[in-house]
Image (cartoon, rainbow, N blue to C red):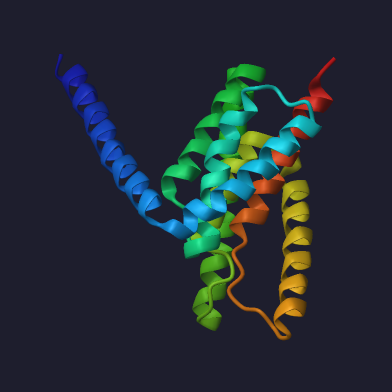
């Protein structure tokens, strides 16, 4: 009986915590005009990509947090924890739906390991140089991306995001006539995850 009460209280605490977080994040998003203005082009990009791959309708649920985090990162150089959580929940649900529980647990382990490795690398770089190369939000997104795309596709969505990021940086440097610093990597990483997730769905179709 005591265990059930503790479990219920813990669940209630988590729901209240995330309820407050949701309210705070949504309020911040509504009042940040910069984020709102950037949502529409990202939404058009993701919907067009979804149509191009003839994606399952469920992948539009994945697009929602990716669009939100892309606009927020571009505007404020941060990735909301709630958006990362949404991507992770989608990925975990997709793995449980499309594979066995054992495979899902293995993928979850790889996701945690990927987050830990990339967070560690980013922390080491920051301590050595005093500059942030890969933020903790990016590391969380990489871990969530493993759940959406599979551990075997980690290298691929990182490769796509890196190539896109390099091209984007070169373009901005050319437009501004000089080196550009502090480029948001989240939008490139988010879109790469979406594309690879859709590709995985296409490959697994009969």
Residue 185 vertical placement versus 195 (above, below) = below
Q: Can residue 139 be seen in this snapshot?
A: no
Q: Position of residue 198 (x, y in %)?
A: 74, 32
User: Residue shown at 53%/72% (left/top)?
Assistant: 132
Q: Residue at x 42, y 43 (%)?
A: 82
User: Residue farthest to the bottom?
Assistant: 178
Left or right: where 140 falls relative to 98 = left
**In this image, 93 relative to 50: left or right?**
left
Is 122 drawn above or below residue 26 in the view shown?
Answer: below
Identified at 54% across, 37% down, the residue is 64
Picture quadrant where residue 21 is located: top left
Residue 90 placement (x, y as % from top left): 55, 30
- Is 150 situated above or below 171? above
**Residue 164 occupies quadrant:** bottom right
Of residues 193 and 142, the one drawn nearer to the viewer in this rendering? 193
**Residue in the image at 73% along x and 48% along y:** 157
For the residue pair 104 and 24, the one nearer the viewer reads as 24
């Amino acid at each position: 009986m005591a265990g059930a009460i503790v479990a219920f209280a813990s669940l209630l605490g988590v729901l209240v915590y995330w309820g407050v977080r949701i309210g705070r994040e949504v309020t911040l998003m509504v009042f940040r005009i910069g984020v709102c203005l950037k949502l529409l082009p990202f939404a058009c990009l993701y919907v067009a990509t979804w149509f191009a791959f003839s994606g399952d309708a469920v992948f539009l649920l994945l697009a929602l947090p990716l669009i939100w985090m892309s606009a927020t990162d571009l505007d404020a150089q941060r990735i909301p924890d709630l958006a990362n959580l949404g991507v992770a929940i989608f990925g975990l649900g997709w793995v449980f739906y499309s594979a066995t529980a054992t495979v899902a647990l293995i993928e979850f382990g790889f996701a945690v390991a990927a987050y830990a490795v990339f967070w560690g690398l980013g922390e080491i770089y920051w301590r050595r140089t005093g500059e942030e190369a890969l933020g903790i939000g990016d590391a969380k997104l990489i871990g969530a991306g493993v759940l959406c795309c599979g551990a075997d596709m980690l290298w691929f969505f990182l490769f796509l995001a890196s190539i896109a990021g390099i091209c984007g940086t070169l373009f901005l440097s050319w437009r501004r006539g000089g080196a550009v610093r502090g480029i948001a990597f989240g939008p490139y990483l988010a879109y790469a995850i979406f594309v690879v997730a859709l590709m995985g769905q296409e490959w697994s179709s009969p």
